[in-house]
Image (cartoon, rainbow, N blue to C red):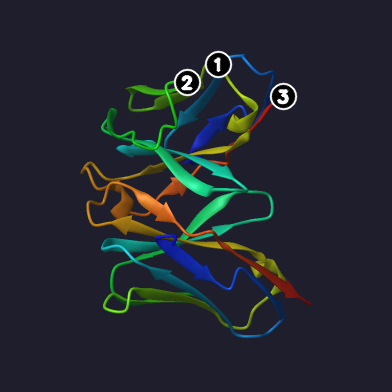
Amino acid sequence: DAGVIQSPRHEVTEMGQEVTLRCKPISGHNSLFWYRQTMMRGLELLIYFNNNVPIDDSGMPEDRFSAKMPNASFSTLKIQPSEPRDSAVYFCASSLSGMVQGARETQYFGPGTRLLVL
Amino acid sequence: KNEVEQSPQNLTAQEGEFITINCSYSVGISALHWLQQHPGGGIVSLFMLSSGKKKHGRLIATINIQEKHSSLHITASHPRDSAVYICAVAETSGSRLTFGEGTQLTVNP
């Protein structure tokens, strides 16, 4: 298996632009997580999907952030409009569970998308 | 006070030394994870445990639920072990992970 795939790996954009990050989880995995990592705040959960349904989106910072999972093999995280404080590494992870308890399982992380908003 | 605290924040060791990284947490948990983040940024799950001890190669992870404490041990450390080690706890509801700030480990040859 190719593991969790994220694209793009790097993104540089200007403030105010829309940014779309993409994730393909491991085939057969039913839970998907979006995380953000910054020097100041470390790793933070943004949103968690189980069977394509958002279960916990309390970490989504504000209305500028949105995430979708239209099917079991694809998810997007969108920032519109982007701001310099959104600069971070965004990780997608997946786990096997079909239950709503994905944090109790081993999670497999993608390589991350390094976002820089100028 | 952070819900998950790691110590030390930075650790430098000589090759071959025994290393211990500690993690304390203040919330009720259903599981605790140890992650390794390589210098290139990739994150790998090392252990997920809810009681007792787990061992994989030179790595050992222990947890004491009553004391709300976990340790990650590395025996016969090697320069390739140099990475950031992150402790994360799954809260009782099980739906999210809360992360520690990480421990930067450098093993010198």
Mark 2 residue type: Arg
Choose top left, top right, bottom left or bottom right for residue A117: top right
Q: Residue under label 3, please give it.
A: A118
- Left or right? Give the position of A62 relative to B27: right
Q: Secondary structure at mark 3?
A: loop
Name the residue rendered at 55%, 51% in the picture: B43
Q: Residue under label 1, please give it.
A: A81
- Left or right? Give the position of A109 relative to B42: left
Tell me, for residue B99, which label it has, or none: none
Residue B96 image offset from top left, x and y in percent: 33, 47
**On screen, A54 above or below B70?**
above
Q: Nearer the viewer, residue B91 or A93?
A: B91
Res. B58 visible in picture: no
Q: Upstream in the sequence, badge 1 or badge 2?
A: 2
Labels 2, 3: one chain: yes
Name the residue rendered at 66%, 85% in the picture: B17
Q: Residue furthest right?
A: B109
Label 1 neighbourhood size at 10 Å, few (<14), some (14-19), many (20+)? some
Q: Upstream in the sequence, badge 2 or badge 3?
A: 2
Labels 1, 2: one chain: yes
**How far apart are the alpha carbons under marks 1 and 2?**
6 Å
Q: Residue under label 2, please give it.
A: A64
**On screen, B75 above or below B42?**
below
Label 2 neighbourhood size at 10 Å, few (<14), some (14-19), many (20+)? few
Say which chain tag 1 marks: A
Mark 3 residue type: Leu
Residue B36 image offset from top left, x and y in percent: 55, 60
Say which chain tag 3 marks: A
**How far apart are the alpha carbons under marks 1 and 3?**
12 Å
Quadrant of the rendering where the C terminus of chain A is positioned: top right
- Left or right? Give the position of B69 relative to B84: left
